[in-house]
Image: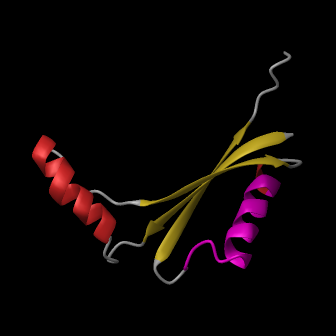
């Protein structure tokens, strides 16, 4: 089965986010006073061939950890898995 697996990497709460702060200060505040906080991160999208959602998630989790795609001291990750539906049905 094919899965789309999203890996999002964000700074942990309490860790400064200078890029998010800059966007907040120079773009958001000029356009809306409703936006109170912006956090910036990295987004990676994988197409994974796996037996099930758990295996697809484990593949991306292992890849992210073993290849240091993020720093676990300052970052948190969120992994979301979606099955790719067969278009031939």
Residue placed at 89% from the left, 48% from the top?
51
Horizontal and vertical percent position of residue 43: 54, 55
Q: Is residue 80 above or below residue 89?
A: below
Q: Is residue 79 above or below residue 30?
A: below
Horizontal and vertical percent position of residue 1: 87, 40
Is residue 34 visible in this depiction of the protein? yes
Magenta residues span: 55-71
Residue placed at 55% from the left, 65% from the top?
77
Tell me the quadrant of the picture where the C terminus can be found: top right
User: Residue 48 or 31: which is nearer the viewer?
Assistant: 31
Is residue 37 visible in this depiction of the protein? no
Along the horizontal axis of the image, is 47 left or right of 45? right
Which secondary structure dominates the residues rendered in magenta? helix
User: Residue 67 or 5: which is nearer the viewer?
Assistant: 67
Horizontal and vertical percent position of residue 6: 62, 50
Q: Is residue 61 magenta?
A: yes
């Amino acid at each position: 089965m094919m899965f789309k697996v999203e890996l999002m990497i964000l700074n942990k709460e309490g860790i400064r986010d200078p890029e998010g702060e800059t966007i907040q200060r120079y773009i958001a505040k000029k356009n809306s006073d409703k936006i109170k906080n912006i956090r910036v991160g990295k987004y990676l999208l994988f197409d994974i061939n796996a037996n099930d959602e758990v295996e697809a998630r484990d593949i991306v989790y292992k890849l992210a950890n073993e290849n240091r795609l993020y720093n676990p001291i300052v970052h948190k990750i969120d992994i979301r898995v979606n099955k790719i539906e067969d278009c031939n049905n």
